[in-house]
Amino acid sequence: MDHSIYRSHVLICTGTGCVSSGAKNIKVKLEDELARFSLNKEIKIIETGCHGFCEKGPIMIVYPEGVFYCQLEEEDVVTIVEEHLLKGRIVDGLLYKEPLTEESIPAYQDIDFYKKQERIVLENCGKVNPESIGEYIGLGGYEAAGKALTTMTPLEVIETVKQSGLRGRGGGGFLTGLKWQFTHTAKGDKKYVICNADEGDPGAFMDRSILEGDPHRVIEGMIIAAYAIGADEGYVYVRAEYPLAISRLEKAIEDAEELELLGQDLFGSGFNFKLNIKKGAGAFVCGEETALMASIEGKRGMPRPRPPYPSVKGLWGKPTNINNVETYANVPFVIKEGAAAFAAIGTADSKGTKVFALTGKINNTGLVEVPMGITLREIIFDIGGGLTDGKEFKAVQIGGPSGGCITEENLDLPIDYDSLKSIGAMMGSGGMVVMDEKTCMVDVARFFLNFTQNESCGKCTPCREGTKRMLEILNRICEGEAREGDLELLEALAHHIKDTALCGLGQTAPNPVLSTLEYFREEYEAHINEQKCPAGVCNALASSYQIDQAVCVGCGMCVKVCPVDAISGKPKESYDIDAELCISCGACADKCPVDAISQG
Amino acid sequence: MKSLEELKELREKLQKDIAMRDDSEKPKIIIGMGTCGIAAGARNILQAVLEEIDKRNLDIVVTQTGCIGMCEKEPLLDVQLPGKKRVTYGNLEVNDVKRIIVEYVINGKIVEDLAIAHFEE
Ligand SMILES: Cc1cc2nc3c(=O)[nH]c(=O)nc-3n(C[C@H](O)[C@H](O)[C@H](O)COP(=O)(O)O)c2cc1C
C-alpha cells in the first residue's frame, strides 16, 4: 500500500452513471493538468463509487475543503486546477446550485440533496476508493468482523442482529437475525451464505452502486453472517450486466485474501471462509432465492415451491442463508455500533435506513439513503428537489414490477415495510419512480406487466398464461379496443394469479394493475368508455394537438421538434398542425414559448 | 490477519491517508502559493509542512492561497486553529516550519519572532 503525503485529495465519481456522463475523460484531463503544473506529487486523484447525485454527474469533490463540483466538462478541469488547486480559490460557477433558491453551495454536506439523508450503507460510497482495501481499513473496516470472530459467539452475533431489528432489504422484509438463526440451527456438515445481487427490477441500481462503491462492506457483512451460521463458503450472485461491480468485487476479494481477511483461520479464530462470485445471465426470476440457487448449481433458473426453505435445504441441498446486498452492508454497523444504535434509527417495526433509487420526473434523480419513517414528501420534494419543469405530482411507483403506486393523499405517510403494504404498495428493493400529470397510469401498469410477462419463467400456469391474458387486456384498453367486461376480467385474473402463482414473481405481478385500478380507476374508465387517454399518452386515444392561431407568434420552434413533420406554416406568421399526421407526443406544446398549443 | 490487534495496528497506519476526507473542523494551514510565494520558495515550505504532519501524525488541513499583496514577506504561511485568531507567519525558511508546528499548532504558543500578523476571521 503506497503511503505518500498529499495536501489535497480530488475525488472523482466513476460509478456507472458518472462514467456514462464522461467521468473518465474528466479524470484523464485532470491528470494532464496536474502534470502540467507539477502538482501530481501534492494532489492525489481518487476514483470513487457513486455519490448518489447521478443527475449532476460528472462529479468532483476537492478535499480538504470538501468542495463539490458538478456537471463538469473537460474545460472546467482547467479552471479548477488553475483557480482552486493552484490558487486556493473556489470556482463559484461550477458549484451546485439549489434549484429553488439558485444559491450556490460549496460544501457537499450542505446541499439539500444530502442534508436529509442518513448514511449507514452508503457511508463510504463516493468517499473512498473502492479498489483500495487500505482506505476501507483506514476507516475502521473489518473491525466488526474481527470483533465478531474473536469476542462473540455465533449465537451472540445472531442475538445482536435480532435485537437490532434489521430486516431483509431484498423486498420481503424478513427479520435477518431470525433467518440466520434458522440456518444456524439447521443440521448439516456444510452450510453456505449467498449474497443476492441479481437486482432485476427496472430502474433499480442500489445494489450495483453499493458493490461498485464499497465492496468490502458487503464482504465484511458476509464474513459475519457466515461465522454466525457456521458456513465456510459463500457466493455473491451478481448479474453479468454489472461488469464494473464484478471487477471491483473481484479485486476486493483478492485484496482481502491477501491480507487473510478471507481464507483460513481468520483473526486467529480458527474460522475459515471462502468467497466466490457467480455471474448470472440477468433473468428477473433468478433474483428469487430458489431460482437463484438452481442457477448457481448450473441448472435452469426456475423457482421451486417452499418449504423447504433455503435455511434448511438450500444450495446443493445444504442449509443456506441468502440475503440481499444492502442487508449484508448493514451488518458491520450493527456489530460495531451495537443493536441499540441501529434500532435507534427508524420506526417501531422497521429499523435503520433504506436506500432508494430515485428516478422519473424529478429534479434530483439519484441514489438516496434515508431513515425508515421519513415521508415521501420529504424524499420527493426536499431531497429530490421536486418535479421537473414545475409539473404537478401525480403518483410515485415503489417496489418496481411487484409494487404499487402512491398518490398525493399518502405523501405524508411515514414510510416503512408495513405502512407501504397497508396502502397496496411495497418496499420492494427500493426503486422509486416519480410520475407527473403527463403520465398515463394505464400505460404504467402495462409497462410493468409487459416486463413481468416477458420475465415469467413459464413453470407455473397462472403466471405464464395469466400475465399474458392480463397484458392482452391492457393492450386493448390502451389501443381503444376494450370490450365490455374487460375491467372486471382484468381484476378477477389479477386476484387469481396473486393467489395461485408458484413464486413471488407471479404472486406480485398483478400489483401494479391492482394499485392503479384502486387509485386511478377513472383513468381506465375514460380509456374504455370515452375512448380517451386523459394524460394524452396512449397514441391511439390521444387527441391531436392544435395551435391557437391568435396566440401563435410564428417562431417555428414547434416545427423543429415535431418528429413526424406534421406542422407547417410561415415563419413570423403562424403555423398549423395536420391532425392526420399528429401522433400526440406533445413535444411541440412543451417547446412553445407562448403556450399556443394544446390538445383538442 | 492473525488477530484483531494486528488489524487495529494496520488501521493506525492507514487512517491518516484518508483523514483529510472527514468533514469535521480541524486546524488549517494555508500557504501562499502565488507566483511571488513560489518564487520565494513556498513549494519547499509546503513540502516541509506535509512531512511534519505526516511524521507527527497530525490531523490538519493544508490548503493554499494566491498572492495576498505582501510579496516581500513571502513565503507566507497562515495557521487557523479552531476557535482562534488566524496567525500569519512570513519570511519563512524551511527550518521554521518545525517550530511553527511544534510551538503553535501543537502547543498553542504563537512564535512571535516569525509572526507578522494576527487577525480575526
Ligand atoms: C421474482 C423475484 C425477484 C427477486 N429479485 C431479488 C433481487 O434482485 N435481489 C434480492 O435481494 N432479492 C430478490 N428477491 C427476493 C429473494 O427471493 C429473497 O427473498 C431475498 O434475497 C432475501 O434477502 P433479504 O432477506 O436480505 O431481503 C426476488 C424475489 C422474487 C420473487
Image: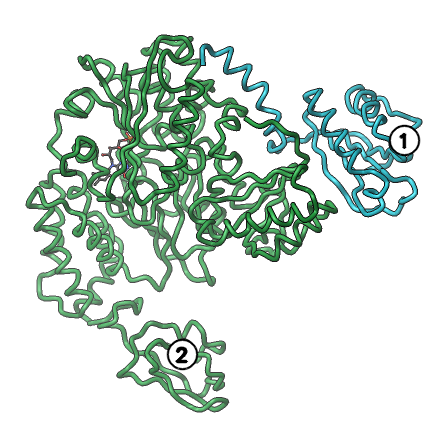
Chain colours: A green, B cyan
Q: Quadrant of the N terminus of chain A?
A: top right
* Residue at (34% x, 32% y) in the render: A325
* Residue at (19% x, 47% y) in the render: A509
Q: Nearer the viewer, mark 2 or mark 1?
A: 1
Q: Is residue A232 left or right of residue A336?
A: left
The residue nearer to you, when weighing A595 against A572, is A572
Q: Which numbered disc covers residue A597?
A: 2
Q: Position of residue A479 (x, y in %)?
A: 18, 69
Q: Position of residue A429 (x, y in %)?
A: 31, 39
Res. A259 image quadrant? top left
Residue holding disc 1: B115
> Mark 1 is on which residue type?
Ala
Q: Secondary structure at mark 1?
A: strand
Q: Is residue B57 left or right of residue A280?
A: right
- Residue A496 seen from this side: no
> Mark 2 is on which residue type?
Ile
Quarter of image, ligand 1: top left
Q: Which numbered disc covers residue A88?
A: none
The residue nearer to you, when weighing A7 against A350, is A7
